[in-house]
Amino acid sequence: MDHDRDIQHTHNFFVDDLKLFGSSEKIIKKQLDIVTIFSRDIGMQFGESKCGYFQIQKGKNVTSNQPLVMNGLSLKPIEEGDCYRYLGQDENISYAGEVNKKRVFKEYFTRVKKIWSSELCDFNKVIAHNCFANQVIIPTIGVLNWTVQEIKGIDIKTRKILSMNGSFHPNSDIDRLYLQRKDGGRGIKSVESLFESRTLSIRQHLLRNKSRNDILTYICNKETNEIVRVGKEIVMKYEMVDNIEDAPKQMSKRYFIKQRKDLEKRYTEKVMHGYFKRKLENNEIIDLKSSLSRSIDKKVTSHFEGYLSAIHDQEIPTKSLIHKCD
């Protein structure tokens, strides 16, 4: 139960996210009787507009049209096709995965658009994106049945929104966008990297603790062809050491180190986009760290940052580039 104090600072409280199960209507009424009496005694109350009930037989909804009444509380029947929200997720007879995905998509892109159309400087936009927008996706990884294509699609649409707001040149290097600012990137965390890191952490947790009790053993066996398999593919993709005894945080940390090195290597080896960084690395008099760092001036706009990256990637014809080509 989550208790939220009333705005008027009285001693009344509201009950949220409470679910009761029973094998028959008689048992449910008995449970509801206990809950309503207890709630009334401690000064809590139900928000009837958000309450409802299902009656299921053999996997089908057989709920009548009559409300379920107990001690002054009236629960409306939830019709077939409708959903109720529990712990922030939409459910009905089964888990409404597609409904939840649509809600997550909508909320995530709403936040991304608000952030990158605002007048914040680029440094603050990146922080807001990583801490405010990405947090919509992270808790759903391992809960919703995300596919790799859906995750990659989120990153693609995110880059389109950045381009529409003048914060990312359409021809700029994608790998550099996700590099850390101290390495010359923009510092944005891709949804794909968050998905892979979270999947590895969940897999590591299941494999380490599967022998602790029967429930974890059952979950691990059930996820053999899903999270466990996908996690194994990620380990092989980045050629990581697969030590089951490592803590999930250690595995996640190793993943981000590997992934960052892989991004930097791909970016540097590109003939055109990596030319600027290679020239800096080959010149001993240049301070590479200071030249690539984007954290020196935190007040520049995302428009300036986007086009500066495009100039470094030789996607915008400057006089120097035109002279070199001639």
Image (spheres, rainbow, N blue to C red):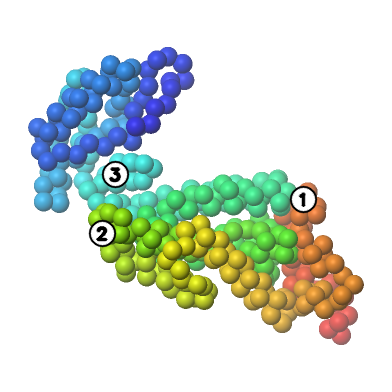
Is disc 3 surrounded by few (<14), some (14 to 19) or many (20+) residues within 10 Å?
some
Residue 297, percent across and down? 80, 52
The answer to which of 191 and 301 lies nearer the viewer is 191
Q: Which mark is residue 317?
A: none
The residue pinned by badge 2 equals: 218
Tally of marks: 3
- Give the residue displayed 87% in from the left and 85% down from the top: 326
Residue 59, percent across and down? 15, 51
Secondary element type, mark 1: loop
* Above-or-below relation of 157 to 3: below
Determine whether label 1 and label 3 are within 8 Å by CB. Answer: no
The residue pinned by badge 1 equals: 298
The amino acid type, in three-letter code, at marker 2 is Tyr
Visible residue check, residue 93? yes
Secondary element type, mark 2: helix
The amino acid type, in three-letter code, at marker 3 is Cys
Q: Which mark is residue 83?
A: 3
* Above-or-below relation of 250 to 55: below
- Give the residue displayed 87% in from the left and 75% down from the top: 284
